[in-house]
Amino acid sequence: MKDVSFGSYFPADSFVHKMDARAKILIAIAYMVAVFLVSAFHFLGFAACLSFVILTTAVSRVPFFRVLKSVRTIIFFVVFSAILQLFFNSKGTVVFWVITDVGLLNAAFIIARIMLIVLGASLLTLTTSPVELADGIEGLLYPLKWIKFPVHEFALIMSIALRFIPTLIDETDRIIKAQKARGADFESGNIFKRAKALIPVLIPLLISSFRRADELADAMDSRCYAGSKNRTKYKKMRLSFRDLMGVLAVAGLIVGIVFLNKFYAINTLAQIAGAL
Amino acid sequence: MEIVAENLTFTYSPKTKGLSFRALNGVNLTVKSGEIFGIIGKTGSGKSTFVQHINGLIKVQKDSGALKVGEYDLTDKKCDYKSLRAKVGMMFQYPEHQLFAETVAEDVAFALKNFNKDLSAEELAGRVRQAVEIVGLDYNEIKDKSPFDLSGGQKRRVAIAGVIVAKPEILVLDEPAAGLDPKGKREFLELLLKLHKDFVKTIIIVSHDMNLVAEYCARAAVFAGGKIIATGTPKEIFSDGKVLAESGLDLPLTASLTEKLKSKGVDIDSDLTVKDFTEKLIYALKNGGRQDERRFFRQLFPRRLFRA
């Protein structure tokens, strides 16, 4: 239960950590767009994205293995989609049994795409604390105030949810232990039996969440918390040269990929056959 | 069932550098059958990790010493944890947070159903009734109620009924009195004494509350930094200045009074339970001391204190 690495913050004092959260979120979105822009079978574009990730990781001082660890949680999903591509592709020439050359390339393409996106997303959460992230999203959603969308409340809900994840994990651990001590068995039986065995954990968890919510609401009330009106921030977000550099880097990446797509694209089957 | 730990060691996340933390560092301890045994120490001293070893919630790591509970060898990979857990009941802090069923009877029966799958409905109901009545609740009145509609003290009683219903030989309690008001606390501790008299053989209490340990435990072990730095009766532990300094523990009320009186030249040799201490104190007041000392006692303990 304890090693939930996807989305955990890695505190450090670095260029990337000091960047404005709003800029980082926008850059991450732009980066994902860039990954999706890489046209089929064109691996040079992926190499560009990968070097972007490696460069950012190096600058952020997050250990490489920590970034790679985030891929571990979705490895099943990656393998599953790769296998689908391998076995259910009838185009191209057969290399082995039912596997075609196009199938192989497609599988590699899918693996590269998902991995690169997850790496980018986890780099964002590794270098941005949950509080900053919520602040950043609030900042980005600010224009929605114009159509009476409760931006501040939305951001608050989000940061509270993030804040309580570790607390709930601890609580789950405790309740699982308490029920195990009463002979509950979570490890044997078929999937339905196991799902049923979770009821004695889920109900106390749900009840304690409600209790916590009540207590939190009382605590906020007693400190006269009253939402967004006239509320100032302890840490004001400010754009700096770092953010400009980040934006320039990701813009360069996108331009590069569009350029590669246009002039070095290998889009037709004949071209792949020729390349092989 | 006797608990014997030899050189028991435990490390959290042993493979991750930087995150790994040695919680137990060579623990040697024997808890005899039939004792009320206290385990004391500051937060993070390893006491919680140790007691969770006793019923296999934390498994003994490879090459990390030995642990035997009765005939169960917990270093053995084939150890039957389920039947062990039926014999070693464990109640965590705030046990009322583990209640989940629709009715009290169902919640209390949970452990019993898990441990004895082939019990008939009548036997089941009989055992549940027995457990509920032992903890001092009215079975007929309470059995169909939702556990969430009960008061705090009642919830805790239901939770402990849900543990002792499996008739464990050893009962481990982590901070059993936390969060109860003084009256509820006293009643709950009296209940524990009653349980020890006719239901559970061995009781292990993990607590920060030194008064509780001095009052109820025959022996205790002091944890500090993953090791046991002292084992003995409360009197032995609380009169050992070195142990107290190393563990950073407070004194129970009786022990600190004994110390204060000693500095005024009066020795009171009690076992640190309130009853024994007051008896010895009254004896000293009646028989010993010079006139000015007696006046000093009167200041500390006005006459009306002893009328009841």
Image: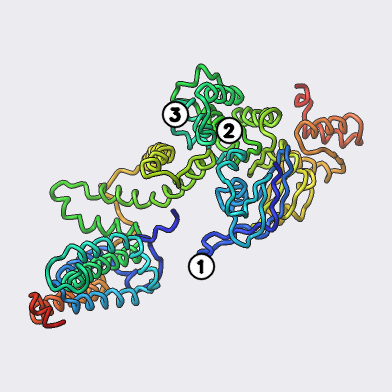
Sort mark 3 into few (<14), some (14-19) or many (20+) by Cα contacts within 10 Å. some
Give the colouring mode of the picture. rainbow
Disc 1/disc 2 C-alpha distance (Å): 41 Å
Using the rendered image, report if marks 1 and 3 lie on a common chain. Answer: yes
Secondary structure of the residue carrying numbered label 2: loop
Q: To which residue does mark 3 refer?
A: B148
Q: Nearer the viewer, mark 1 or mark 2?
A: 2
- Give the vertical position of A76 relative to B278 (above or below): below
Please give the chain letter of the residue carrying mark 1: B
The disc, 1 or 2, on the residue closer to the chain's N-terminal end is: 1
Q: Gap between marks 2 and 3, in whole Å?
A: 22 Å
Which residue corresponds to the image point at 29% horizontal and 56% vertical from the top-left? Answer: A134
Q: The residue marked by circle 2 belongs to what chain?
A: B
- Residue carrying label 1: B18
Tag 2 residue: B166
Horizontal and vertical percent for residue A63? 40, 72
Q: Is residue A215 visible?
A: no
Amino acid bearing label 2: Ala
From the top left corner, tell me how far across and down residue A16 is, in percent: 32, 71
- Labels 1 and 2 touching (C-beta < 8 A): no
In this rendering, position of residue B42 left or right of residue A158:
right
CA distance separating discs 1 and 3? 42 Å
- Is A153 located above or below residue B64 in the figure? above
Name the amino acid, label 1.
Answer: Gly
